[in-house]
Image (cartoon, rainbow, N blue to C red):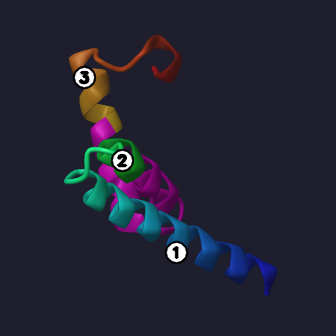
């Protein structure tokens, strides 16, 4: 039961951060990109489509040599 609750809370927090990030793109007070990245990071734990997107991005950055050394 607790596992399901933590998963639901992670998904809800990820969606909230992504939505806050979208709003932040238009408001000067919020860092929209930061909230979107954090939200997608949370969602990539539980949502396979977001996980695949993250893996493709990491692979692309590795190929281009733009990923910091500690992530290689």
- Residue 63's disc is 3
- Residue 12's disc is 1
Q: Is residue 69 left or right of residue 63?
A: right
Q: Are marks 3 and 1 in contact (CB under 8 Å)?
A: no
Q: Quadrant of the N terminus?
A: bottom right
* Residue 51 drawn in magenta: yes
Mark in front: 1 vs 2: 2
The residue to which callout 2 is attached is 30
- Residue that protrudes farthest toward the right in the picture: 2
The count of marks equals: 3
55 w.r.t. 3: above or below: above
Q: For numbered disc 2, what is the local secondary structure?
A: loop
* Residue 43 drawn in magenta: yes
Marks 1/2: CA–CA distance: 20 Å
71 w.r.t. 26: above or below: above
Mark in front: 3 vs 1: 1
Residue 47 in the image: x percent, y percent?
44, 68
What secondary structure characterizes most of the magenta part? helix
63 w.r.t. 21: above or below: above
Highlighted range, magenta: 37-57
- Binning the other alpha carbons within 10 Å of mark 1 as few (below 14), some (14 to 19) or many (20 upward) gives some
The mark that comes first in sequence, 3 or 1, is 1
Mark in front: 2 vs 3: 2
């Amino acid at each position: 039961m607790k596992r399901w609750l933590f998963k639901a809370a992670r998904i809800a927090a990820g969606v909230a951060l992504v939505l806050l990030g979208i709003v932040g793109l238009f408001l000067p007070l919020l860092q929209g990109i930061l909230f979107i990245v954090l939200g997608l990071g949370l969602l990539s734990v539980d949502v396979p489509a977001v996980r695949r997107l993250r893996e493709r991005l990491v692979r692309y950055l590795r190929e281009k040599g733009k990923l910091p050394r500690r992530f290689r």
